[in-house]
Amino acid sequence: MRTPARIALPVILPRAAVLWALVRLVVASLPLATGSPFGSISPSPIAIVLLCGLVGLVDVSVRGERILWANLGVQRRVLYAAYAAAAVPAECLLALVHR
């Protein structure tokens, strides 16, 4: 029998990677609103991971997929964890590149 994580991960991970890139781009471009240079704010990687999970849940709700995932037995916390977990390797790689 397939677990909810095995059902959700193949669908969510590609979306989560794109979502992480967009969240990072938005956070990096926020200083432009105040006249500061692009990327002058350095957010915490943990905050980015948590934000990706939250924005992922909003994405699922906006797409109207919440009932579909519930019918497949996938709970909200599994969806949140999938979106957040996809951001962890990306943040680790980004931290290694910037050092």
Image (cartoon, helix red, strand yellow):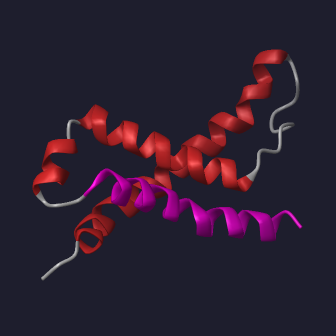
Q: Residue 58 in the image: x percent, y percent?
A: 38, 36
Q: Is residue 87 left or right of residue 75?
A: right
Q: Is residue 8 left or right of residue 85?
A: left
Q: Residue 80 in the image: x percent, y percent?
A: 42, 53
Q: Residue at x 20, y 36 (%)?
A: 64
Q: Residue 69 in the image: x percent, y percent?
A: 19, 53
Q: Is residue 86 magenta?
A: yes
The C terminus is located in which quarter?
A: bottom right
The N terminus is located in which quarter?
A: bottom left
Above or below for 45 versus 3: above
Q: Which SS type dominates the magenta stretch?
A: helix
Between 99 and 81, the residue placed more toward the observer is: 81
**Residue 17 visible in rendering:** yes
In the rendered image, the residue lying farthest to the top is 34
Q: Residue 59 in the image: x percent, y percent?
A: 36, 39
**Residue 21 visible in rendering:** no
Q: Is residue 72 magenta?
A: no
- Residues drawn in magenta: 75-99
Between 68 and 30, the residue placed more toward the observer is: 68
Callout count: 0
Q: Residue at x 10, y 54 (%)?
A: 71
Q: Residue at x 47, y 40 (%)?
A: 55
Above or below for 14 versus 26: below
Residue 33, quarter of the rendered image: top right
Q: Is residue 48 left or right of residue 82?
A: right
Between 17 and 49, the residue placed more toward the observer is: 49
